[in-house]
Image: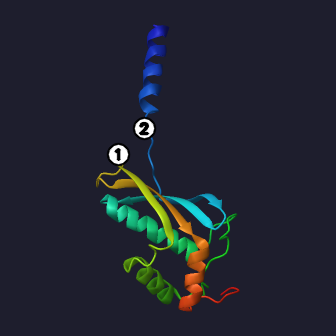
Amino acid sequence: MVKKIFAYLILFFCFSCNRSFVISETIIATNYSGFQVECLVTTFEKNETDGVNKALRKTFERLFFIGFPNTISNTPLVANNSNTEKNNQLLKDFIDNKSYSPFVSSISHQSRKNKVDKNNHFVTNTQIVIDISSLRRHLETVGITRKFGY
């Protein structure tokens, strides 16, 4: 009797531990060296392409207006003076026109169906490497930022 209960417990733990559920969207700066930042972004979207686009948008939004603590870009690149309409337009133009492409060294992603979600969204893990120094120079040239700060 005890052996049966023990066997059922082992089977229960084996089958319940093999799944991992992602329940929130995240963005983490995983590696930063020299003038590059490598970010790992998790998103939920209807398809993989939307997931990668959302990951790019979230990464540049974080880089422009918040910054990544304990990296070379710990301060935001663009002043966040509560002018959200102007900031949203800047980010939208940057992403929609694919102006980010010279500054992104690599993009790799991995997707899978979300087992928790009833709408069959994809969980997309995207790894993005961004060249911060050239992005900063571009923002200075365009006139969004000044050489020594906002």
Locate residue 90, reporting x and y percent: 47, 85
Placement of the N terminus among the 4 image quadrants:
top left
- Total number of numbered labels? 2
Residue found farthest to the bottom: 143
User: Which residue corresponds to mark 2?
Assistant: 19
Amino acid at dot 1: Lys
Amino acid at dot 2: Arg
User: Which residue corresponds to mark 1?
Assistant: 115
Is residue 37 left or right of 91 when viewed as pictured?
Answer: right
Q: Which residue sits at x=44%, y=72%?
A: 101
Is residue 116 or residue 111 the one in the foreground?
111
Q: Which residue sits at x=44%, y=80%?
A: 94
Placement of the C terminus among the 4 image quadrants:
bottom right
Locate residue 70, reporting x and y percent: 70, 63
- In the rendered view, would you say 52 is above or below 148? above
Q: Which residue sits at x=50%, y=65%?
A: 105
